[in-house]
Image: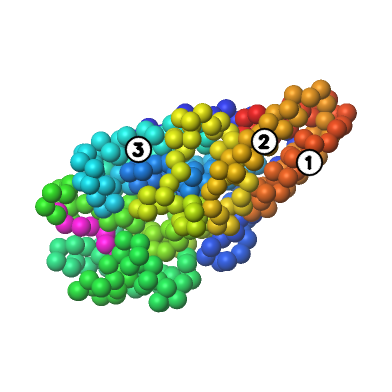
Amino acid sequence: MQAWTKPEIPVVPGPARRLRLYDTASAGPVEVPPGTDGPARMYVCGITPYDATHMGHAATYVTFDLINRLWRDAGYEVHYTQNITDVDDPLLERATATGVEWTDLAAREIQLFRDDMTALRVIPPQEYVGVVESIPLVVDQIAELQQAGAVYSVDGDLYFAVKADPAFGSVSNYDADTMRELFAERGGDPDREGKRDPLDALLWLHERPGEPAWDSKLGRGRPGWHIECSAIALKYLGMTIDVQGGGSDLIFPHHEMSASQAQCATGKHPFARAYVHQAMVGLDGEKMSKSKGNLVLVSKERQAGTDPMAIRLALLAHHYRTDWFWTESDLLAAQERLDVWRGAVTRGSGPDGAAAVDALRAALTNDLDTVAALAAIDQWSETNGDDTTAPALVAEAVDALLGIKL
Ligand code: 5CA
Ligand code: ZN
């Protein structure tokens, strides 16, 4: 599938720094990629296209865009893949509820997402891959799992046996009760009769009346959720990737399952060197989510005339590992900051530009500390100095590293 328009990315002079990120699996910092050879490989879970793009989605894709930018700054070639869950229960349910074709709904929301990502200056992935166009790939992946002895059938539906992966559980490190609870909450079916383990995950759902289905050697049906990300990541990036990314709502079961399935299919471990998770953005005391309907949409804000750079700056004002609630004042503060920064980079001179750029790099490579990064640019903007090259240099660095065009 076509991604979206790539923004210009200036090359910033001065020594880059290596990136350290908090890894959910080891509950500590890791340096990714581990060596100096590229490419750096990242897979980020994409949207289920039925109500895009809310500020939580935007926070997630802006966070992983920072990783992309910092890797490029450090001289790595970046290989980035993102999926689109363009066939799944919530999408089909929304289409039925609103009386539209599921394919039309998906196409409309994907286009909206592309436009939002372009406006927010998010660098597109090299491969932007839908599930519908990946059915043969997914089927082959399930067949590999069958060969590994990790698949069984319940009334014609195929399941992944989590016990087949000795490392199952090591992404989230959740206890059994938590896993079961989250599995039930997030699309799983722990109580289905005939399953060997309540946590075993659906790989292939045989055809249901009135639902889309595809012919395959597994029978006529459609893929379960987690296998799409294992299959697409393995096909385009291979083992072992540097970063598996998404929101913290995907830690379990989604990232646990997609990693386990990839590990079982390849016999290699681990699927990713770092599992990186954006904390949840909420509204009025609750997680912002399509199912709850409490959404602030990027597209609506843009239509209302909000500068997309102010939206991006509002998101960056919160550290990615802290849950937060979106409010109108986030946007007002961001617009104010944007005005100050724009004023500062059009001055004839400012404080030491190289020092400001280094402070920006130091903050961002330290587990994406955007709060410190923004403070460094605030300080530079609010101080006078006689470095005449500084305004242009700082504007370039803010563009290349934060993705904010001043
Ligand atoms: N298609 C699947 C992933 S394979 C999915 O979770 N789609 S989604 O549309 O629900 O979410 C898209 C991305 O945004 C995911 O990475 C998800 O973790 C993240 N996300 C969803 N809601 C929020 C939120 N409130 N705050 C932060 N990130 C969120
Ligand atoms: Zn995914």
Please name the amino acid that badge 1 sits on. Gln
Q: Residue 109 — which label?
A: 3
Image side of residue 188 versus residue 354, left or right: left
The magenta-colored residue range is: 201-207
Can residue 264 be seen? Answer: no
Mark 3 C-beta closer than 8 Å to ligand 1:
no
Of 72 and 65, the residue lying toward us? 65
Disc nearer the start of the sequence (3/1) = 3
- Please tell me which residue lies in front, 390 or 309: 309
Query: Seen in the image, is 277 located left or right of residue 48?
Result: right
Q: Is residue 124 left or right of residue 313?
A: left
Residue 359 in percent (x, y) is at 76, 44
Q: CA distance from mark 3 to mark 1?
A: 39 Å
| Residue at (85, 29) in percent of width and height | 387
Please determine whether, in this image, residue 222 is positioned above or below residue 313.
Answer: below
Residue beneath disc 1: 379
The residues bearing labels 2 and 1 have C-alpha atoms spaced at a distance of 14 Å
Query: In this view of the protein, which residue sits in the foreground, 236 or 389?
Result: 389
Q: Quadrant of the C terminus?
A: top right
User: Residue visible at 64% across and 41% down?
Assistant: 333
Q: Give the CA distance from mark 2 to mark 3.
A: 31 Å
Specify few, some or many for label 2: CA neighbours under 10 Å numbering under 14, 14-19, or 20 or more: few
Label 2 beta carbon less than 8 Å to ligand 1? no
